[in-house]
Amino acid sequence: MEFIKGLFRFIFSKAFLIQLVLAVTLLVIMGYVALQWLEGSTNHDQQIVVPSLSKKTIAEVDELLDDKGLRFEVQDSANYNPDFPKFSVIDQNPASGTMVKENRKIYVTLNPSGYRKVEIPNVLQKTRRQAEPKLIALGFKIGSIIKVPNMSSLVLELRYQGKKIQPGDKLTKTSVIDLVVGDESGQTVNLSPDN
């Protein structure tokens, strides 16, 4: 009982109350300083609008983002897109118009210099109906259909720009391939791609 009376006297003593006020004041000051430091170091209220980098070269991207206090990193190139200049930005993350903080890294995807090369499949000795979809599915275009006298109506040869090509050769995607097809009628006929 004596201990409890002594504790109450100490809690309500002038020395304890002064220490309590000092401790609370010091805690409030430290909390305020910490919040100010965090706000300043994390750029809490700072907002920078990410600009559109579409169709810009790396040099233009570097200059534009440097002026805004932003950084960038090039991600792997994507598939070639003919609507964009070679080696220009075709995609960015975060997107343009997004609000970010200073020194934020913007990830950009570049347009390669052209379509990638694709291996020509073996469509020799296949029917035209089998060969055309296979070539088109790989991104090639079908050019002329050249019919030559032959006992079968199968694909006998593939040509690119007038030169014979072989299965396994590589051509740029969207290349136009002409098909030489056998014609049992015995006539040589050159059909345009529209026929």
Image (cartoon, rainbow, N blue to C red):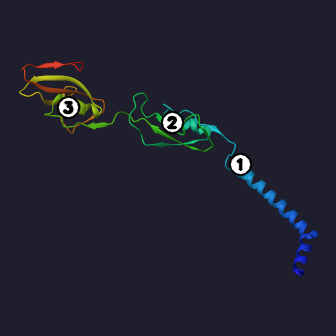
In the rendered view of the protein, which quadrant contains the N terminus?
bottom right
Tell me if label 3 and label 2 are in contact, CB under 8 Å. no
For residue 98, the mark is none
Q: Secondary structure at mark 1?
A: helix
Residue 127, x across and y down, in percent: 15, 30
Residue 186, x across and y down, in percent: 6, 20
Q: Is 157 above or below relative to 33?
A: above
Q: Is 18 above or below relative to 186?
A: below
Spatial separation of the CA atoms under disc 2 and disc 1: 31 Å
Label 1 environment density (alpha carbons within 10 Å; few <14, some 14–19, many ≥20): few
In terms of image quadrants, where is residue 162? top left
Give the residue at mark 2. Answer: 59
Q: In the rendered structure, which amino acid carries the disc numbered 1?
A: Gly
Q: Nearer the viewer, mark 3 or mark 2?
A: 3
Give the residue at mark 1. Answer: 40
In terms of image quadrants, where is residue 94? top right
Residue 115, x across and y down, in percent: 34, 33
Q: In the rendered structure, which amino acid carries the disc numbered 3?
A: Ala
Q: Secondary structure at mark 3?
A: helix
Q: Give the residue furthest to the bottom.
A: 2
Q: Earlier in the sequence, mark 3 or mark 2?
A: 2
Give the residue at mark 3. Answer: 131
In terms of image quadrants, where is residue 104? top right
Spatial separation of the CA atoms under disc 3 and disc 2: 45 Å
Q: Secondary structure at mark 2?
A: helix
Asked whether, in this view, residue 120 is left or right of residue 22, the answer is left
Q: Residue at x 43, y 43 (%)?
A: 76
Q: Residue at x 30, y 37 (%)?
A: 117
In the rendered view of the protein, which quadrant contains the C terminus?
top left
Q: Residue at x 59, y 34 (%)?
A: 97
